[in-house]
Image (tube, rainbow, N blue to C red):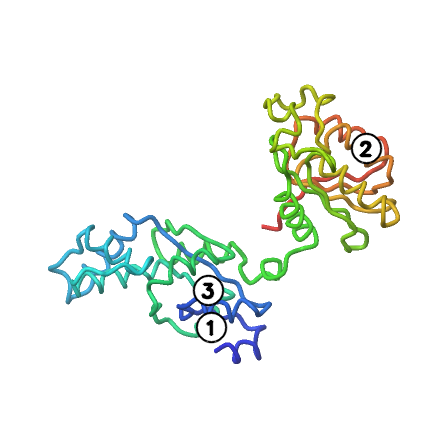
Protein backbone atom coordinates (compact mmCIF):
# COMPACT_ATOMS: atom_id res chain seq x y z
CA UNK A 1 0.00 0.00 0.00
CA UNK A 2 2.81 2.42 0.86
CA UNK A 3 4.51 1.86 -2.49
CA UNK A 4 1.20 2.20 -4.33
CA UNK A 5 0.13 5.50 -2.79
CA UNK A 6 3.67 6.87 -3.10
CA UNK A 7 3.53 6.30 -6.84
CA UNK A 8 0.08 7.92 -7.11
CA UNK A 9 0.07 10.34 -4.17
CA UNK A 10 -1.87 13.04 -6.01
CA UNK A 11 -4.99 10.91 -5.70
CA UNK A 12 -6.79 11.06 -2.32
CA UNK A 13 -6.85 7.85 -0.30
CA UNK A 14 -8.14 6.79 3.11
CA UNK A 15 -7.19 3.73 5.14
CA UNK A 16 -7.88 2.29 8.59
CA UNK A 17 -5.32 -0.51 8.29
CA UNK A 18 -2.40 1.23 9.98
CA UNK A 19 -2.88 -0.63 13.24
CA UNK A 20 0.65 -0.61 14.69
CA UNK A 21 3.11 2.10 15.63
CA UNK A 22 5.61 0.57 13.21
CA UNK A 23 3.26 1.07 10.27
CA UNK A 24 2.38 4.61 11.35
CA UNK A 25 6.08 5.45 11.61
CA UNK A 26 6.66 4.18 8.08
CA UNK A 27 3.87 6.31 6.62
CA UNK A 28 4.81 9.40 8.65
CA UNK A 29 8.00 9.65 6.60
CA UNK A 30 5.97 10.46 3.49
CA UNK A 31 5.16 14.17 2.88
CA UNK A 32 1.65 13.37 1.64
CA UNK A 33 0.51 11.55 4.80
CA UNK A 34 -1.87 13.01 7.39
CA UNK A 35 -2.80 11.00 10.49
CA UNK A 36 -6.28 11.93 11.73
CA UNK A 37 -7.88 10.64 14.91
CA UNK A 38 -11.68 10.66 15.02
CA UNK A 39 -13.11 10.11 18.49
CA UNK A 40 -16.49 10.26 20.20
CA UNK A 41 -17.73 10.44 23.80
CA UNK A 42 -17.89 6.98 25.34
CA UNK A 43 -21.61 7.08 26.14
CA UNK A 44 -22.42 8.20 22.61
CA UNK A 45 -20.38 5.35 21.12
CA UNK A 46 -22.14 2.83 23.39
CA UNK A 47 -25.55 4.05 22.18
CA UNK A 48 -24.40 3.88 18.57
CA UNK A 49 -23.15 0.34 19.05
CA UNK A 50 -26.48 -0.78 20.48
CA UNK A 51 -28.36 0.98 17.69
CA UNK A 52 -26.34 -0.96 15.13
CA UNK A 53 -26.95 -4.19 17.00
CA UNK A 54 -30.70 -3.50 17.02
CA UNK A 55 -30.64 -2.95 13.26
CA UNK A 56 -28.85 -6.26 12.80
CA UNK A 57 -31.31 -9.19 12.66
CA UNK A 58 -28.88 -11.49 14.52
CA UNK A 59 -28.48 -9.19 17.52
CA UNK A 60 -31.93 -7.68 18.12
CA UNK A 61 -32.52 -9.64 21.30
CA UNK A 62 -29.32 -8.70 23.07
CA UNK A 63 -28.26 -5.22 24.17
CA UNK A 64 -24.63 -4.52 24.91
CA UNK A 65 -24.26 -3.49 28.57
CA UNK A 66 -22.27 -0.38 29.34
CA UNK A 67 -19.93 -2.45 31.52
CA UNK A 68 -19.15 -4.87 28.70
CA UNK A 69 -18.71 -2.02 26.24
CA UNK A 70 -16.29 -0.15 28.53
CA UNK A 71 -14.29 -3.31 29.25
CA UNK A 72 -13.85 -4.07 25.57
CA UNK A 73 -13.21 -0.44 24.72
CA UNK A 74 -10.38 -0.48 27.28
CA UNK A 75 -8.99 -3.63 25.70
CA UNK A 76 -8.95 -1.96 22.29
CA UNK A 77 -7.55 1.35 23.54
CA UNK A 78 -5.04 0.17 26.14
CA UNK A 79 -4.54 -3.56 25.62
CA UNK A 80 -6.29 -4.71 28.79
CA UNK A 81 -7.83 -8.19 28.80
CA UNK A 82 -11.29 -8.16 27.16
CA UNK A 83 -14.30 -9.68 28.87
CA UNK A 84 -15.02 -13.24 27.69
CA UNK A 85 -18.24 -12.34 25.87
CA UNK A 86 -18.11 -12.73 22.11
CA UNK A 87 -21.27 -10.71 21.57
CA UNK A 88 -19.89 -7.86 23.64
CA UNK A 89 -16.58 -8.08 21.77
CA UNK A 90 -18.34 -7.82 18.42
CA UNK A 91 -20.22 -4.77 19.68
CA UNK A 92 -16.99 -3.16 20.83
CA UNK A 93 -15.45 -3.76 17.42
CA UNK A 94 -18.50 -2.15 15.81
CA UNK A 95 -17.98 1.02 17.79
CA UNK A 96 -14.63 1.47 16.07
CA UNK A 97 -16.57 2.62 13.01
CA UNK A 98 -16.66 6.01 14.73
CA UNK A 99 -12.98 5.93 15.71
CA UNK A 100 -11.20 6.22 12.38
CA UNK A 101 -7.87 6.47 14.11
CA UNK A 102 -5.68 6.14 11.03
CA UNK A 103 -6.53 8.25 8.03
CA UNK A 104 -4.37 9.46 5.18
CA UNK A 105 -5.65 12.30 3.00
CA UNK A 106 -9.42 12.14 3.58
CA UNK A 107 -12.19 13.13 1.24
CA UNK A 108 -15.73 11.69 1.12
CA UNK A 109 -15.27 10.76 -2.53
CA UNK A 110 -11.69 9.60 -2.08
CA UNK A 111 -10.54 6.09 -2.83
CA UNK A 112 -10.80 3.67 0.11
CA UNK A 113 -7.72 1.48 0.29
CA UNK A 114 -9.15 -0.79 2.98
CA UNK A 115 -11.94 -0.75 5.52
CA UNK A 116 -10.85 -3.46 7.97
CA UNK A 117 -10.59 -2.68 11.68
CA UNK A 118 -7.26 -2.36 13.52
CA UNK A 119 -5.87 -5.74 14.51
CA UNK A 120 -3.46 -4.56 17.17
CA UNK A 121 -5.98 -3.19 19.65
CA UNK A 122 -3.51 -2.40 22.40
CA UNK A 123 -1.77 0.20 20.23
CA UNK A 124 -4.83 2.35 19.50
CA UNK A 125 -4.34 4.90 22.31
CA UNK A 126 -0.68 5.35 21.35
CA UNK A 127 -1.58 5.71 17.68
CA UNK A 128 -4.22 8.33 18.51
CA UNK A 129 -1.61 10.31 20.42
CA UNK A 130 0.44 10.59 17.22
CA UNK A 131 -2.46 12.10 15.26
CA UNK A 132 -1.71 15.38 13.55
CA UNK A 133 -5.39 16.26 13.78
CA UNK A 134 -7.93 14.95 16.31
CA UNK A 135 -11.65 15.30 15.70
CA UNK A 136 -14.53 14.73 18.12
CA UNK A 137 -17.38 13.11 16.21
CA UNK A 138 -20.71 14.08 17.76
CA UNK A 139 -22.56 13.91 14.46
CA UNK A 140 -26.03 12.41 14.35
CA UNK A 141 -25.43 10.68 11.00
CA UNK A 142 -22.62 9.61 8.69
CA UNK A 143 -23.65 12.22 6.14
CA UNK A 144 -23.28 14.94 8.78
CA UNK A 145 -19.84 13.60 9.70
CA UNK A 146 -18.76 13.53 6.05
CA UNK A 147 -19.99 17.09 5.60
CA UNK A 148 -17.93 18.21 8.59
CA UNK A 149 -14.84 16.36 7.37
CA UNK A 150 -15.19 18.00 3.97
CA UNK A 151 -15.37 21.44 5.62
CA UNK A 152 -11.95 20.80 7.21
CA UNK A 153 -10.34 20.62 3.76
CA UNK A 154 -8.16 17.74 4.88
CA UNK A 155 -6.43 17.26 1.50
CA UNK A 156 -5.13 20.84 1.58
CA UNK A 157 -1.38 21.17 1.17
CA UNK A 158 -1.37 23.53 4.15
CA UNK A 159 -2.16 20.57 6.39
CA UNK A 160 0.57 18.46 4.84
CA UNK A 161 3.15 21.23 4.68
CA UNK A 162 2.82 24.28 6.99
CA UNK A 163 2.86 27.80 5.60
CA UNK A 164 5.91 29.93 6.35
CA UNK A 165 3.97 31.80 9.04
CA UNK A 166 2.87 28.54 10.68
CA UNK A 167 6.40 27.18 10.47
CA UNK A 168 8.02 30.18 12.13
CA UNK A 169 5.32 30.51 14.80
CA UNK A 170 5.87 26.83 15.60
CA UNK A 171 9.59 27.56 15.99
CA UNK A 172 8.68 30.34 18.42
CA UNK A 173 6.74 27.83 20.51
CA UNK A 174 9.70 25.45 20.43
CA UNK A 175 12.12 28.20 21.48
CA UNK A 176 9.81 29.21 24.34
CA UNK A 177 10.32 25.79 25.95
CA UNK A 178 13.83 26.94 26.88
CA UNK A 179 12.44 29.88 28.86
CA UNK A 180 13.16 30.00 32.59
CA UNK A 181 10.93 33.01 33.35
CA UNK A 182 8.45 32.41 36.17
CA UNK A 183 5.82 34.67 34.56
CA UNK A 184 5.35 33.15 31.12
CA UNK A 185 7.15 31.29 28.37
CA UNK A 186 7.81 33.35 25.24
CA UNK A 187 9.83 32.57 22.13
CA UNK A 188 10.90 34.72 19.17
CA UNK A 189 12.39 34.02 15.75
CA UNK A 190 13.95 36.51 13.33
CA UNK A 191 14.04 35.63 9.64
CA UNK A 192 15.18 37.17 6.36
CA UNK A 193 13.87 35.79 3.05
CA UNK A 194 12.40 32.83 4.93
CA UNK A 195 15.76 31.92 6.47
CA UNK A 196 16.06 31.75 10.25
CA UNK A 197 18.74 34.16 11.47
CA UNK A 198 18.28 33.96 15.23
CA UNK A 199 15.98 32.73 17.98
CA UNK A 200 15.37 33.92 21.52
CA UNK A 201 13.44 33.13 24.67
CA UNK A 202 12.85 35.11 27.84
CA UNK A 203 14.87 34.72 31.02
CA UNK A 204 17.64 36.25 33.13
CA UNK A 205 20.97 37.33 31.52
CA UNK A 206 24.06 35.16 31.35
CA UNK A 207 25.87 34.70 34.62
CA UNK A 208 22.79 35.37 36.78
CA UNK A 209 20.69 32.74 38.47
CA UNK A 210 17.83 31.61 36.27
CA UNK A 211 14.50 33.25 36.94
CA UNK A 212 13.04 29.92 38.07
CA UNK A 213 15.91 29.60 40.51
CA UNK A 214 15.14 32.97 42.13
CA UNK A 215 17.20 35.11 39.74
CA UNK A 216 14.45 37.70 39.25
CA UNK A 217 12.66 38.78 42.40
CA UNK A 218 9.96 40.61 40.48
CA UNK A 219 8.85 37.55 38.52
CA UNK A 220 9.12 35.25 41.54
CA UNK A 221 6.85 37.56 43.55
CA UNK A 222 4.21 37.12 40.84
CA UNK A 223 3.87 40.81 40.10
CA UNK A 224 0.78 41.74 38.12
CA UNK A 225 1.08 42.05 34.36
CA UNK A 226 2.83 45.28 33.35
CA UNK A 227 3.75 46.36 36.89
CA UNK A 228 7.24 46.96 38.34
CA UNK A 229 8.86 46.32 34.98
CA UNK A 230 11.85 48.48 35.97
CA UNK A 231 12.66 45.82 38.61
CA UNK A 232 12.50 42.90 36.20
CA UNK A 233 15.87 41.31 35.37
CA UNK A 234 14.52 39.05 32.64
CA UNK A 235 15.36 39.77 29.03
CA UNK A 236 12.40 39.30 26.72
CA UNK A 237 12.46 36.79 23.88
CA UNK A 238 12.50 39.57 21.27
CA UNK A 239 15.45 41.26 23.01
CA UNK A 240 17.47 38.05 23.11
CA UNK A 241 16.75 37.34 19.44
CA UNK A 242 17.81 40.88 18.47
CA UNK A 243 20.98 40.71 20.58
CA UNK A 244 21.91 37.35 19.11
CA UNK A 245 21.42 38.63 15.58
CA UNK A 246 23.24 41.91 16.18
CA UNK A 247 26.27 40.27 17.74
CA UNK A 248 27.14 37.72 15.08
CA UNK A 249 24.93 37.98 11.99
CA UNK A 250 24.81 41.45 10.56
CA UNK A 251 21.89 43.05 12.37
CA UNK A 252 18.12 43.01 11.94
CA UNK A 253 17.71 45.48 9.07
CA UNK A 254 14.92 44.31 6.73
CA UNK A 255 13.98 41.23 8.75
CA UNK A 256 10.69 39.79 10.00
CA UNK A 257 10.31 39.08 13.70
CA UNK A 258 7.91 36.35 14.84
CA UNK A 259 6.87 36.10 18.48
CA UNK A 260 4.46 34.10 20.65
CA UNK A 261 3.02 37.28 22.18
CA UNK A 262 2.61 40.86 21.03
CA UNK A 263 5.84 42.76 21.84
CA UNK A 264 5.68 45.02 24.88
CA UNK A 265 6.52 48.73 24.76
CA UNK A 266 10.20 48.32 25.61
CA UNK A 267 10.63 45.62 22.96
CA UNK A 268 8.69 47.62 20.36
CA UNK A 269 11.10 50.56 20.44
CA UNK A 270 14.09 48.22 20.11
CA UNK A 271 12.47 46.41 17.21
CA UNK A 272 11.95 49.73 15.45
CA UNK A 273 15.48 50.95 16.20
CA UNK A 274 17.18 47.82 14.87
CA UNK A 275 15.43 48.01 11.50
CA UNK A 276 12.96 45.12 11.64
CA UNK A 277 10.47 45.65 8.80
CA UNK A 278 7.62 43.40 9.99
CA UNK A 279 6.36 41.88 13.24
CA UNK A 280 4.07 38.83 13.36
CA UNK A 281 2.67 37.85 16.76
CA UNK A 282 0.45 35.01 17.94
CA UNK A 283 -1.09 36.00 21.29
CA UNK A 284 -2.32 39.34 22.56
CA UNK A 285 -0.64 41.20 25.44
CA UNK A 286 -1.67 44.03 27.74
CA UNK A 287 0.20 46.68 25.73
CA UNK A 288 -0.91 45.75 22.22
CA UNK A 289 -2.46 49.15 21.43
CA UNK A 290 0.56 51.25 22.37
CA UNK A 291 2.98 48.90 20.60
CA UNK A 292 0.78 48.95 17.48
CA UNK A 293 0.88 52.75 17.51
CA UNK A 294 4.68 52.78 17.68
CA UNK A 295 4.98 50.31 14.80
CA UNK A 296 2.51 52.32 12.71
CA UNK A 297 4.42 55.57 13.26
CA UNK A 298 7.72 53.90 12.38
CA UNK A 299 6.35 52.16 9.28
CA UNK A 300 6.85 48.65 10.63
CA UNK A 301 4.26 46.17 9.35
CA UNK A 302 2.40 44.62 12.26
CA UNK A 303 -0.07 41.74 12.13
CA UNK A 304 -1.48 38.89 14.16
CA UNK A 305 -0.82 35.36 12.98
CA UNK A 306 -3.92 33.70 11.57
CA UNK A 307 -3.77 29.91 11.07
CA UNK A 308 -4.94 28.80 7.60
CA UNK A 309 -7.69 26.69 9.23
Secondary structure state at the residue bearing disc 1? strand
Residue 31, by quadrant, is bottom right
Q: Residue at x 65, y 24 (%)?
A: 217
Kindly report the distance in space between the C-alpha atoms of the residues bearing marks 2 and 1.
50 Å
Q: Are marks 3 and 1 in contact (CB under 8 Å)?
A: no
Kindly report the distance in space between the C-alpha atoms of the residues bearing marks 3 and 2.
45 Å
Q: Residue furthest left?
A: 61
Location of mark 3 (residue): 103
Mark 3 Cα-neighbour bin, 10 Å: few <14, some 14–19, many ≥20: many
Q: Earlier in the sequence, mark 2 or mark 1?
A: 1
- Which sits in the foreground, 118 or 104? 118
Secondary structure state at the residue bearing disc 3? loop
The disc placed on residue 223 is: none
Residue 304, by quadrant, is top right
| Residue 283 appears left or right of 127 | right
In the image, residue 198 above or below residue 159: above
Location of mark 1 (residue): 111
Q: Earlier in the sequence, mark 3 or mark 2?
A: 3
Location of mark 2 (residue): 296
Kindly report the distance in space between the C-alpha atoms of the residues bearing marks 3 and 1.
12 Å
Amino acid sequence: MLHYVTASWQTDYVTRDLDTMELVTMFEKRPFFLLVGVESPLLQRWKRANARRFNSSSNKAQDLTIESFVANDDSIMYGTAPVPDRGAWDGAMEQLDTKLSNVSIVQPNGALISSSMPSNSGALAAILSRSQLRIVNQSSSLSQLYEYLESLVLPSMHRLRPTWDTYFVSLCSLASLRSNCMKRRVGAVIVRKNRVLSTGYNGTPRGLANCNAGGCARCNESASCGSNLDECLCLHAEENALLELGRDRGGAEGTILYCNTCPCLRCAVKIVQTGVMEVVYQLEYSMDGRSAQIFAEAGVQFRKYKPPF
